[in-house]
Amino acid sequence: MPSSDSEDFESADEGQEENDKKVRKKRTSSSNYGDNALETISEPKETIKSSARHQTDSKPKSDGWDDFDIDCPIENEKVVENKEMKKCNVSKSKEDIKSQDTGWDDFDDWGNEETLIKTTEQKQQEVKSDKDIKELTDKLAASTVQSSSWGWGWGVDSLLSSATAGITSITSQVSQGISNVLETGIGAPDPEELARKNLKATAEVTEKHPDRNVNDDKEVVKEAAQTSSDDVSFPFGSLLSGVTKFVETTGTKVIAGGLDTLETIGKKTMEVLQDGDPGLAKKRAMLGLDPGEKPVLSQILREAKAKADEEDKIREEKREAKEVHYENLFDDFEGLVHLEALEMLSKQVSMRIEERLRAADPEKKQDIKETMQQVIELCEIPEDEDDEETSEDQSKPDAFHEKLQIATQDLGLKLQFQSLVKQYTDILDFLSSNDSMNEKVIYKRAVSSLAQATALSVEIYHKTAEMLLVKTRRSTADEADALTQMTVVLTKHISELATLFTVKLNSIASGNKDQINNYITNIFLESGNSSTYIQNAFQLTLPILQIGAV
Amino acid sequence: MVDPIFDYQFRLILIGDSTVGKSSLLKYFTEGKFAELSDPTVGVDFFARIIEVQDGTRIKLQLWDTAGQERFRSITKSYYRNSVGALLVYDVCNRSSFEHIPLWMMEAKRHIEPHRPVFALVGCKIDLVGTDNKNGARREVSCEEARMFAEENGLHHVETSAKTGLNVEEAFVLVAQEVYNRIQTGEYKVEDGWDGIKTGFNRPNGMDFNLLEAETVQSTCC
């Protein structure tokens, strides 16, 4: 039932729409939708007044409702445009009553399938009588979207707070909402208001309805509604059969797409119209304020504040995240850019090797390839030989420094390891200090230290590569051996750092055990990351070693 | 550490003869320090600092400090490509360092192609001018001729001292602003495979806001 409800609803609207369409055609075939919306705004005014006379002409039925909601977003200045349109429409508008009636009356009945079918049949007949049926139906597809969503707008408007339930409940409530709307005179937001805004435009109109004022609107609407319900059986012919397929396709479109937008639009229009002071309404509309949302303003402000807080929080979190984000730290310590520069060198040298290979005669080519392969073999990292003979009279950083120097002594370059050694010293100082530290502080320091040590290591590879390239006398085998040893020392250093930090974390008596375990896992993860960077740097240095041999 | 949030990263390269003061200029700009003695640069060194351009956009300048020594020339030229700006550095008390500027500029243009970098002509060691009695240093490049050369070639020109800090900031801001202006006019774009300009660590606005909007729209349907 609920589903059929919604469909019926749309089809009912379509009846109006169809009529509306005809009217439009009459007026100005060239006018586009937006324009129509504007012009029709003024129409309903007349419509309401003349609602007493139920005219039977289907053509002028255009209720302007669908147009109506379209209009609301449009600025006041556009309303002015209507002035001219109105002039021509005024005469027709008398007859327009009908349209409104039918629309409303259908709304009331929409839950009632029998009535609907009846009306739809009538609709069809009407359509048949029209020569342009086909064209109309085509247009109908488009227009249906608007008109039906208008109805939704009404219903949803009054329901909004409770309308979170499924479509089933909504549809049932919508009908209620609509009747509410009619009774409470929400329907009254008739163009009168709009017309008043635009005095010039309404001049003609007001002449005809001088007695009309805002306060009367409600009653007028009521009246209109009543008359419309009387009319139930009247106008909508048997359009249904011709139209249903459009309804089906467009119905889904409507629901998926335009509904929400139109709902908002409709709401706004209502609010503008209901406001007693047209000048104020105009101003508000111009300022883009929604007068009807006044009571909710505080809520909006609250939400805005909450949002701002949330953003601050996110920002803070991002900053925080970056503080312990390994890659960012690695970048901050210039590790990334050293790696990138090393890569540039590596690529360029590789290209030079390729060139040499291409230029060489076949025999030589084979030699070069073999040599290059030998270099690669020389650079294979040996299996862990576990020779941890740390002399006792030496501090850890000094031992580390010595190892690095021994490893690289055959390189024939003056490499600088001070920064790495100093960093190591600092870390040891930090860890041996008796200040009470929470796990977070240690963790941050651990990640940052790993990133820094890695960045410094990569820098050493980069510098080594640069210096090897400008070195006058190369001894590739020694260089390869030295760099391999250096890589071993550096990767061991990284895992040593990771171990130091995790031991420290484990030694914390108090604190969240889960969190600490989490940190420890991350530290080992990042140390693995560090080793990968170091190995990559080493691999990038390979062509630089190779070119010395070929 | 610097505020990690920035909108763009520009890569600038400093080139010029050995000992003109490139590294000192960068050291002052990034650390506010001046070292009387420093080792010659090996290959390339890196510095970074975040600055703000006129509209408040935060720019991280990644600065490539190249070795001026001839022996590194073959290496340093492979570093040019990803630069969006180049500072041509000379020593106001060293005539030949200024005379080499056109060569440096040609080299930079050739290697940065097809991109067209922002150039700035930066004279260093302005603090030494006038102290000729003591150090034997004397201005060998007048401000006028440097300015003339700059105008002919469409460069910005500035004379600096890494010792007193005079105009150091200005030299870099000048280039950053110019690069930023060219982004605004659409001349420069962030491109894949070119690291001259990169977008930075995002501010937590745009995306989140859009998501919220989208959700609101969705929820009103059905």
Image (spheres, coloured by chain):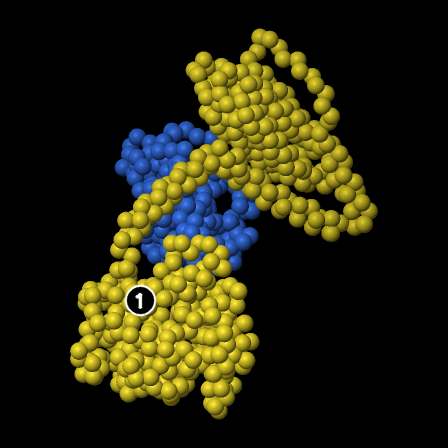
Chain colours: A yellow, B blue
Could you say which is closer to the camera, residue B123 or residue B168? B168
- Disc 1 residue type (three-letter): Glu
At a point 31% along the width and 46% down the height, the residue shown is A302
Q: Quadrant for residue A205, please give it.
A: bottom left
- Looking at the image, the residue that sits furthest to the top is A393
Q: Quadrant for residue B90, please give it.
A: top left
What percent of the width, then of the height, locates residue A135? 49, 85
At a point 48% along the width and 79% down the height, the residue shown is A118
Residue B147, can we see it? yes
- Looking at the image, the residue that sits furthest to the right is A363
Could you say which is closer to the camera, residue A131 or residue A399? A131
Could you say which is closer to the camera, residue A513 or residue B32? A513
Which chain is home to disc 1? A
Tell whether A21 sits left or right of B128.
right
Could you say which is closer to the camera, residue A451 or residue A379? A451
Q: Which residue is mark 1?
A: A183
